[in-house]
Image (cartoon, rainbow, N blue to C red):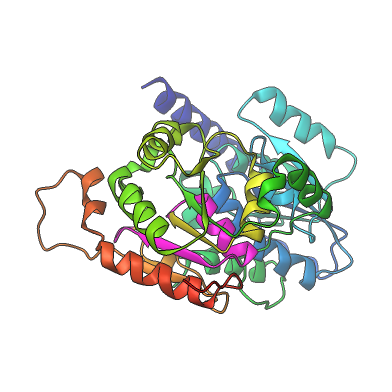
């Protein structure tokens, strides 16, 4: 209730301010010196935005591209070679005040809002209300602060939403691939930390996503069945990954499959990226790590719910060897939403794993 009230007051304040200081659109600069990009949501969202950032940099090669990102999600922007500087942002008014103060004497020529939290929109308006480009659907109730609003409704894939925003802001037409570059020093550090994996072919199982969207997760029982099947048919080491919300799932899987290496809550996002770069394949439901696998070109089996379908959230390039197993939408269901993923056919998962490993660079005779 309190959050709704403060959001109402915030919107009321900026509606009044925009009445006196309207975000009137001026022609967007053709040769901006400084582009400020807001990309302030989750891991997957940051990866979706990475293609748009590439578009902006290639469309304005002489511009300095600065990305404002969630203070706990800086890694995605830090591993994008088209980004010159990363500024962390939190919901704290002090963090927001520091951002405004940072650009007092260096006004951005162009501001682009990609996938953003609500609090980021007024900051873009305050920094340059005449050259502020963003998606109406992403800025939502504060989209009236955009000087150059872009309608992205109906775009066929989620990556293409922010690409449309970037191209409106003068970005180049680029391939739609997400961008994440693993650094050599991170590989060296991880090899020292996990030396036994250097010569061992392995498969990574991401044990789920965040607790807010549990219905997307593959059930623990299905992980266990698949891992036990894999150990009977393939020599690969199985590695479990995940965050704090996946500790219980990881422990349950490891209890029934003691031969796995359980790295749930034991690796950073950067270390997980190194793992994926060297993995034979990744098995994941719709998580940020699944999209990281797509970005790194790790052959990925994406196990998807019908509410996060492959046509919107799946890979745009299947050449690395990705596979999709998607839950069909039932005509009617008495199952709890979190139980629906039990309907993923186990044989389909096994067949997809077999195809990926057959194409994998790690080939063995059984």
158 or 290: nearer the eye?
A: 290
- Range of magenta residues: 285-307
The number of numbered discs placed on residues in the rendered structure image is: 0
Can you give x and y, in whole percent of width and height, for residue 169 in the image? Answer: 69, 66
Residue 349 sits inside the magenta stretch: no
Point 54% across, 69% down: residue = 160
Can you give x and y, in whole percent of width and height, for residue 335 in the image? Answer: 14, 47
Residue 299 sits inside the magenta stretch: yes
Point 34% across, 65% down: residue = 349
On screen, residue 359 above or below 109: below
Can you give x and y, in whole percent of width and height, for residue 286 in the image? Answer: 42, 54
Can you give x and y, in whole percent of width and height, for residue 70 in the image? Answer: 64, 39
Point 64% across, 35% down: residue = 72
84 or 314: nearer the eye?
A: 314
Please indicate, yes or no, whether residue 148 appears anywhere in the rendered image: no
**Residue 345: which quarter of the image?**
bottom left
12 or 247: nearer the eye?
A: 247
On screen, residue 301 above or below 358: above
On screen, residue 176 above or below 71: below
Q: Is residue 359 left or right of residue 74?
A: left
């Amino acid at each position: 209730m309190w959050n709704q009230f403060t959001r109402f007051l915030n919107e009321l304040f900026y509606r009044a301010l925009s009445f006196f200081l309207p975000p009137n659109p001026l022609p967007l600069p053709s040769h901006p010196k400084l582009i400020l990009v807001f990309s302030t949501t989750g891991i997957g969202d940051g990866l979706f935005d990475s293609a748009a950032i590439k578009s902006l940099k290639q469309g304005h090669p002489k511009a300095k591209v600065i990305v404002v990102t969630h203070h706990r999600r800086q890694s995605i922007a830090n591993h994008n070679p088209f980004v010159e500087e990363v500024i962390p942002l939190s919901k704290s008014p002090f963090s927001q005040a520091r951002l405004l103060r940072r650009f007092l004497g260096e006004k951005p020529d162009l501001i682009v809002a990609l996938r953003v939290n609500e609090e980021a929109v007024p900051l873009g308006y305050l920094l340059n209300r005449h050259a502020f480009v963003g998606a109406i659907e992403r800025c939502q109730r504060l989209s009236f602060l955009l000087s150059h609003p872009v309608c992205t409704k109906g775009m066929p894939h989620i990556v293409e939403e922010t690409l449309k925003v970037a191209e409106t802001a003068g970005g180049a037409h680029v391939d739609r691939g997400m961008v994440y570059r693993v650094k050599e020093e991170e590989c060296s550090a991880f090899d020292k930390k996990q030396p036994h994996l250097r010569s061992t072919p392995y498969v990574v199982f991401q044990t789920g996503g965040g607790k807010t969207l549990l219905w997307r997760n593959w059930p623990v029982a299905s992980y266990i069945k698949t891992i036990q099947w894999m150990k009977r048919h393939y020599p690969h080491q199985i590695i479990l990954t995940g965050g704090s919300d996946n500790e219980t799932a990881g422990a349950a899987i490891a209890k029934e499959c003691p031969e796995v290496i359980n790295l749930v809550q034991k690796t950073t996002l950067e270390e997980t990226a190194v793992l994926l770069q060297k993995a034979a394949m990744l098995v994941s439901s719709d998580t940020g790590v699944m999209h990281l696998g797509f970005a790194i070109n790790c052959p990925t089996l994406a196990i998807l719910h019908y509410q996060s379908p492959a046509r919107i959230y799946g890979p745009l390039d299947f050449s690395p060897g990705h596979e999709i197993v998607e839950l069909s939408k039932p005509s009617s269901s008495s199952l709890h939403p979190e139980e629906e993923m039990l309907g993923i056919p186990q044989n389909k998962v096994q067949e997809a794993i077999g195809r990926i490993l057959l194409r994998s660079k790690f080939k063995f005779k059984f």
